[in-house]
Amino acid sequence: MPLSRRLTTGLGMATVTALAAITGAPPAVVAAPAPAHVTAAREAASWLAGEFTDGSLPGPFAPEDWGLTIDGLVALSATGVDAPTRQAATAQVARHVRSYNSYDDWGIEGFTDGGATAKLLYAAAAADADPTDFGGYDLRAETLSLIATADAGHQRGRITSRTTADSGPDASNTFDQSFAVLGLARSGDLPQDTVDFLIRQQCAAGGFRLYPDAADGPSPSCDDQPGATLDVDSTAMAVQALLAAAEDGATGAGDAARKGADWLVTQQHTDGSFGGSGPTTGANSNSTGLAAQALAAAGRDDEAARAAKALAALQLTAGNGGAASADAGAIAYNTDGFTTAAAAGITDTDRDQWRRATAQALLGLAQVPLGRIGLDPPPTSHPTPTGTASPTAPATPTASPTLTTSPPPTGTAGPTPSVTSPPATPAPTTAAPTTAAPPITTPAASGLGGLPTTGAAIGSYLLIALLLIGGGVTLLVLGRRRAV
């Protein structure tokens, strides 16, 4: 390269470098609006955080419902909302391990609930606590001790309960097994037996049954049970557990998860919603929330987005909440519940159902997989360089989907039953509003054409830039003449 060309190139680059230094080099970064479903999830979590009192959520018959409190803790962890409430809830659950996974508080000793123990193990990991020393309990070791061993035959790998009395068939179900797989995968090595037992609950069609037991006792697999009822909620849980297991290297987990996601797609209603089985067959936000979360985890983005749209239509806002507008953010169990609340507000009798529905439904809006809660940053907003188009958030639907009335969800495993009944009067919402991180911007210096203020005088930089530009132009002309 001729010397003049090298000089021209060098001065040209120097000019660009100088101008970049003056104008702030990389473009200022501003926070793009969060996707609509993420914003809805955070609003739901903020409402739910306001329902906590001293780190716990109330139940229908007691001031603390530890199963529901764990659901709420997982929901808040998925969205990153209200760190003080999350910390208080984690501490309270840790203090009440035996209140949840045993009957000690009822004066019945010698019983440990396997499903509740597995759920505690998962919750501790998701809340970024130490599952091997949670309230003084090694939940990982406890869960492993409740896994059926080889002498259990086709029940090998099943999470079971420990009892000193003959209480008949074990009550553990596919929810419990999914929590066992999730919790063990999150806290250390995952025994293949636990994964294999979960996979055996999947029928050839792809869906999972809720209960491993038939009328005459445990059946070896879903296909071995005539007329097995496949369940959306159980399948959504199993898909997420198996995805976590596949990430951990478990054999057969990935294929089973994909097959389960395929089945979920076939169960989605035209409006995007889902229903469960038995008393929850009608479309409802609990089933829709779990299914949306599982579909997103499996990469079925279009179906997950449709489910999120159905959930958003059941969420109270200041504009559509009517008499319940003070509870903006809460998500109804179904359309009837939404309509009733908008007309008369959320009564004390109904508030328990709203807490349970919101805790699971918002998972389908946040769309952070169960296996990643506490590991991945909660979804907020995405940095976008100034001057580029921000992604357009999907519009929040205004029309509610057609959902049929269903009984309230039965909740998750644990000794405390979930029955809709007048709960204790909840405390007023005290959760601080959660907002996205402030945009990173560079304030313009007055009269300087929007140049960033660096704290130093820029006159000398302008002079150098002008000299470099002038010199570059001169050398460019000379270079062109010499080339000719």
Image (cartoon, rainbow, N blue to C red):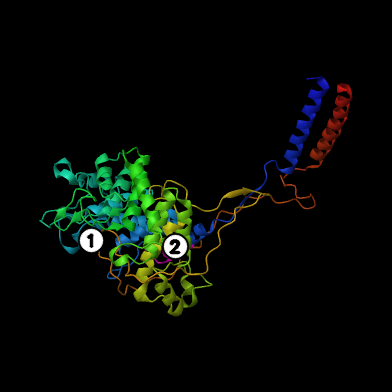
Determine whether, in the image, residue 327 is placed left or right of residue 425: right
Where disc 2 sits, the SS reads: loop
Among the two numbered marks 2 and 1 on one chain, the one whose residue lies closer to the N terminus: 2
Alpha carbon separation for disc pair 2 and 1: 36 Å
- In percent of width and height, residue 231 lies at 31, 58
Q: Is residue 138 visible?
A: no
Residue ID at (78%, 50%) = 449
- In percent of width and height, residue 370 lies at 38, 50
Q: Nearer the viewer, mark 2 or mark 1?
A: 2
Task: Say if the magenta span includes residue 48.
Answer: yes
> Looking at the image, which is closer to me, 196 or 1?
196
- What residue span does the magenta drawing correspond to? 43-54
> Looking at the image, which is closer to me, 133 or 7?
7
Task: Say if the magenta span includes residue 208.
Answer: no
Q: Which residue position holds label 1?
A: 415
Q: Which residue position holds label 2?
A: 270
Q: What type is the residue that disc 2 sits on?
A: Thr
Where disc 1 sits, the SS reads: loop
Q: Residue furthest bottom?
A: 344
| 269 up-or-down from 30: above or below | below
Residue ID at (75%, 41%) = 22
Mark 1 closeness class: few <14, some 14–19, many ≥20 residues within 10 Å: some
> Looking at the image, which is closer to me, 298 or 194?
298
Q: What type is the residue that disc 1 sits on?
A: Pro
Point out the image quarter for the C terminus.
Answer: top right
